[in-house]
Image (cartoon, rainbow, N blue to C red):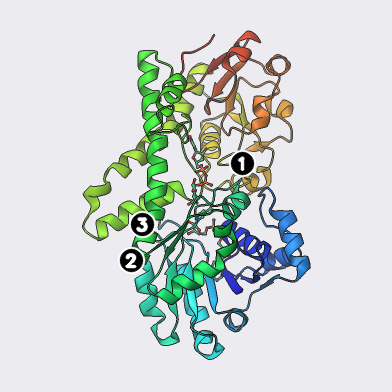
């Protein structure tokens, strides 16, 4: 089949490459000319495991091409996936739909004249419930139908998540739209992916409800870490014991600095704002608490580090391990690690940040922080080390070797993934949220 993918960011670039990989002819479209040129040359604009090789492979076959022309997109195919960003409106927390509307408005004029057998615009962006209906009204003159097919990929495992999804949700307004989406996803369904067909409002809601649930799970365990800090209980044992109950499950129960990134924080705020608009604000009022518990973890981490350096950051040297919002990604959008690093810097510390992949993006966003290309350089003469993004390589560090380069062997393991006993045995004082302090 022929498809277009409009918006070639994290979601769109991966979707376009994976759809071409499964055999479709795909045209990726973006307003960003530099991005389109890089993608056309097989270069992804961000770090995502497996994407670079897949892009090069599919571009070389000719099944994947890129353009900035929306008129070309309308002519090329009858099925158009919309993957543009839906950022947070700063004043209200609601979703800003201007990119979705601009994309659809730019596509619409070409659709009627394109002569495809009924164009279908398929939203993948995360949107407030009711958006597909509004867009259908907007597209009325073009004769196009609208479907919603939310995306559940995680950065760092986006390619695998797209090729082996745990579910495909297709929100449709007609049998023809469902048949079209079943044809698009036939290779993935044949490989075992469940296909859930529903109406568009349910599909939109599945997405925001899923992200809200994941965010709630993380804030729940972080709230328990706060209780553990006061009672002396161990949050890691608590999480493991809770997670052993198959009704609860172990995933998304890692306590620590909390969630960041371009999605969970903005999605819970947008859901809360949309619920207010439809008169059901009280139904999801708990999401405000989830958000507050989450941002409180940043303040708790800073307070802990400040105590470790004697009550003031002024003139202190602080090493930060991790800048990306999660391991496996170079995305620093709403990164908890960088939010902590920048606050510590503003309070007078000299902050040196290490990250295996995200230093360029971090430097662009926070130019006043210092950056080091290896962990040893970041830690030289540090008064305290803050472990803020749980890259696997940080778990392999040699605590004894690092103790020799810092000024004071003091570690805040804000991601709760270091081997506390090994660090303690090597002479470190180590503190992690919700865990009995060693040293
Ligand atoms: P992104 O910011 O990485 O990419 C968006 C792309 O859309 C950019 O390349 C931008 O230039 C392009 N764009 C903007 N306006 C355009 C227009 N009018 N026409 C064509 N292109 C346009 O965003 P993302 O992280 O890929 O997220 C996209 C959507 O998917 C959001 O709604 C997000 O909430 C959702 N989502 C993201 C993820 C994720 O892990 N990043 C996962 C699931 C869902
Ligand atoms: C998340 C969802 O997991 C995806 O299903 C969804 O498609 C995506 O948002 C989206 O809508 O954009 P992602 O943001 O890539 O994916 O990353 P996650 O793995 O969910 O991690 C989010 C944040 O939560 C990270 O900062 C991570 O460090 C934190 N986290 C995660 C915890 O603090 N504890 C945990 O137990 C798990």
Which residue is the extreme one toward the right?
A: 60
Marks 1 and 3 in Cβ contact (< 8 Å): no
Residue at 47%, 27% in the rendered image: 301
Q: For mark 2, what is the residue?
A: 130
Distance CA(mark 1)–CA(mark 3): 40 Å
Frontmost residue, 433 versus 214: 214
Residue at the (61%, 19%) spot, across then down: 383
Image position of 243 with respect to 4: above or below = above
Q: Is residue 89 left or right of residue 283?
A: right
Residue 13: where, in percent of width, then height? 62, 61
Residue at mark 3 = 205
Neighbour tally class for label 1: few under 14, some 14-19, many 20 plus, Cα within 10 Å: few
Q: Report, in whole angstroms, how far the alpha carbon at label 3 lies from the one at label 2.
A: 9 Å
Q: Position of residue 290 (x, y in %)?
A: 35, 39
Circle 3 SS class: helix
- Residue tagged 1: 368
Q: Is residue 293 left or right of residue 153?
A: left
Q: Which of disc 3 and disc 1 is earlier in sequence? A: 3
Circle 3 crowding by C-alpha within 10 Å: few under 14, some 14–19, many from 20: some
Give SS at disc 1. loop
**Residue 183: percent from the left, percent from the top?**
54, 69
Q: Is residue 417 left or right of residue 37?
A: left
N-terminal label among 1 and 2: 2
Q: Earlier in the sequence, mark 3 or mark 2?
A: 2
Asked whether the viewer can see residue 242, the reply is yes
Disc nearest the viewer among 1 and 2 = 2
Asked whether disc 1 touches disc 2, contact meaning CB atoms under 8 Å apart, the reply is: no
């Amino acid at each position: 089949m022929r498809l277009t993918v409009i918006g070639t960011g994290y979601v769109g670039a991966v979707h376009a490459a994976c759809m071409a990989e499964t055999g479709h002819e795909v045209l990726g479209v973006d307003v960003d000319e530099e991005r389109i040129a890089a993608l056309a040359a097989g270069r992804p604009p961000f770090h995502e495991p497996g994407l670079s090789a897949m892009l090069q492979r599919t571009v070389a076959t000719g099944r994947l091409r890129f353009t900035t022309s929306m008129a070309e997109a309308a002519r090329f195919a009858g099925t158009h996936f919309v993957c543009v960003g839906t950022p947070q409106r700063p004043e209200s927390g609601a979703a800003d739909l201007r990119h979705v509307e601009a994309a659809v408005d730019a596509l619409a004029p070409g659709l009627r004249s394109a002569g495809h057998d009924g164009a279908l615009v398929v939203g993948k962006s995360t949107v407030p419930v009711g958006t597909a209906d509004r867009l259908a009204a907007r597209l009325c003159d073009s004769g196009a139908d609208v479907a919603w097919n939310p995306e559940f990929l995680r950065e760092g495992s986006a390619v695998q998540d797209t090729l082996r999804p745990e579910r495909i949700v297709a929100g449709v307004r007609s049998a023809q739209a469902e048949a079209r989406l079943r044809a698009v996803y036939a290779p993935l369904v044949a490989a075992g992916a469940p296909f859930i067909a529903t109406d568009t409002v349910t599909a939109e809601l599945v997405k925001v409800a899923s992200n809200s649930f994941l965010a709630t799970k993380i804030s729940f365990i972080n709230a328990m870490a706060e209780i553990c800090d006061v009672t002396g209980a161990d949050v890691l044992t608590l999480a493991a014991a809770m997670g052993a109950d198959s009704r609860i499950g172990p995933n998304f129960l890692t306590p620590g600095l909390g969630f960041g990134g371009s999605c969970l924080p903005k999605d819970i705020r947008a859901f809360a704002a949309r619920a207010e608009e439809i008169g059901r604000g009280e139904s999801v009022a708990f999401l405000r608490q989830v958000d507050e518990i989450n941002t409180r973890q940043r303040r708790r981490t800073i307070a802990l580090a400040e105590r470790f350096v004697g009550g003031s950051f002024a003139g202190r040297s602080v090493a930060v391990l991790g800048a990306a919002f999660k391991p496996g990604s170079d995305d620093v959008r709403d990164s908890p690690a960088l939010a902590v690093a920048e606050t510590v810097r503003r309070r007078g510390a000299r902050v040196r940040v290490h990250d295996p992949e995200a230093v360029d993006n971090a430097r662009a966003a926070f130019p006043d922080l210092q950056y080091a290309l290896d962990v040893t350089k970041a830690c030289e003469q540090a008064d305290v080390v803050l472990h803020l993004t749980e890259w696997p390589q940080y778990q392999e560090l040699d605590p004894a070797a690092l103790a020799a380069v810092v000024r004071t062997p003091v570690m805040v393991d804000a991601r709760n993934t270091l081997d506390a006993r090994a660090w303690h045995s090597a002479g470190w004082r180590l503190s992690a949220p919700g865990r009995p302090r060693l040293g």
